[in-house]
Amino acid sequence: MSTGACGTGWSQVAAGMQTFQIHNSSTAGAEVDLINPADGGIYAEVEALGPGTTRPMRVDVGSGRYAFRCLIEDTDALTGPTVRVAGHVKGAAAILPVTTDDLLAPAREYHAYVTGGLSTLVGQTGALAAAIRSGHLATARTAWLAAHLTYERLGAAYGTFGNYDTEIDGRPDGLHGGVSSPEFTGFYRVEYGLWHGQSATELAGPAGQLDQDVRALQAAFPGMEIDLLDLGLRTHEILENALEFQLTGHDDYGSGTTLATTEANVEGTFELLKVLHPLLAARYRQLPAVYTWLDRLQGLVAAARHPNGSWTPVDDLGPSGREQINAAASQALEELAPIAVISEPRRTR
């Protein structure tokens, strides 16, 4: 490929697994896609191909028509000659590219979802702070869990929140003094105090700060834009974080409710899939498997909730129960992984 040519140097190819060596003869970085020239569906891609470099593209070639499309920085896209592979051999499926325009409606829908969630959250953190000021710590524990789960359902917005997320849901990891650090704020700071015998007087400040930070986030959010790339990326990352921090018990600061948080994370993932479903349904053949494994994970986690509303801590699960939850989470992540690439907004011309 170069600024004047794309996909030259091939005219015949056999069906089956093939490796194309893609060489960038231009002086700028580029992306190269192997496409269906009829509709622009992408079979395979090579990204971040530097000038003068060669990278392999491995693809299962089936019967049909193929062409390379080259997208060089600051240059219009070039599409090379069409090559026909004869026969009736099934190969990799082409996926229609998602454009920025395709993602605008899902982004608006998700922005509205987060706006509603923040409205609920403000009321809940206000109730939490009020319960602590009144010395009703048992009520505060119930209020804390409700508010924290509302926040955890907001999923894909964390990157948009910026420093607000650190203030509201940050961990003490790396802070001098750990849980005793004055820089430790937010939900986990209040959780630590509520379940480690701290008094209402000690907790009034952290709870008031949490409520203040949530209200500041609500006021700032209308001016924030959700990164379009995050919509697909977060479908995987929400659950990935749950596996790393919730299902290991890392983020249990005394309440024993990390399985409740995992359930909220699953609900946040479902919400993202809901807004992306019109784009994914025609592009991702394994989408039904995503729902199958998320449903299984949700059911396994829900079984750890007791009739009185309390939760079994992760460390109290038996080996079999913990293994089943981890396996379901891992398989769900496996099925979710391609969505980030499928829903990445692309330049096609």
Image (cartoon, rainbow, N blue to C red):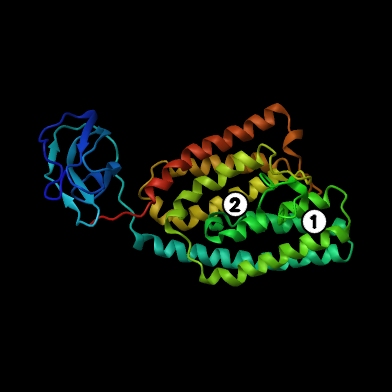
Of badges 1 and 2, the one in the foreground is: 1
Which residue is depicted at the point 64% across and 47% down?
263
Q: Is residue 225 above or below residue 66?
A: below
Which residue in the protein does label 2 denote? 267
Residue 93 quadrant: top left
- Which residue type carries mark 2? Glu
- Crowding at label 1, few (<14), some or many (≥20) Cα neighbours within 10 Å? some
- Furthest residue to the front? 176
Query: Does label 1 or label 2 sit earlier along the sequence?
Result: 1
Q: Is residue 113 above or below residue 296?
A: below
**Residue 63 as seen in the image, left or right of residue 323:** left
Which residue in the protein does label 1 denote? 142
Quadrant occupied by the N terminus: top left
Quadrant occupied by the C terminus: bottom left
Which residue is depicted at the point 63% across and 55% down?
166
Q: Is residue 303 above or below residue 125?
A: above
x then y, percent, for residue 81? 11, 44
Which residue is depicted at the point 19% across and 32% down?
88
**Residue 14 as seen in the image, left or right of residue 300:** left
Q: Secondary structure at mark 1?
A: helix
x then y, percent, for residue 55? 26, 35
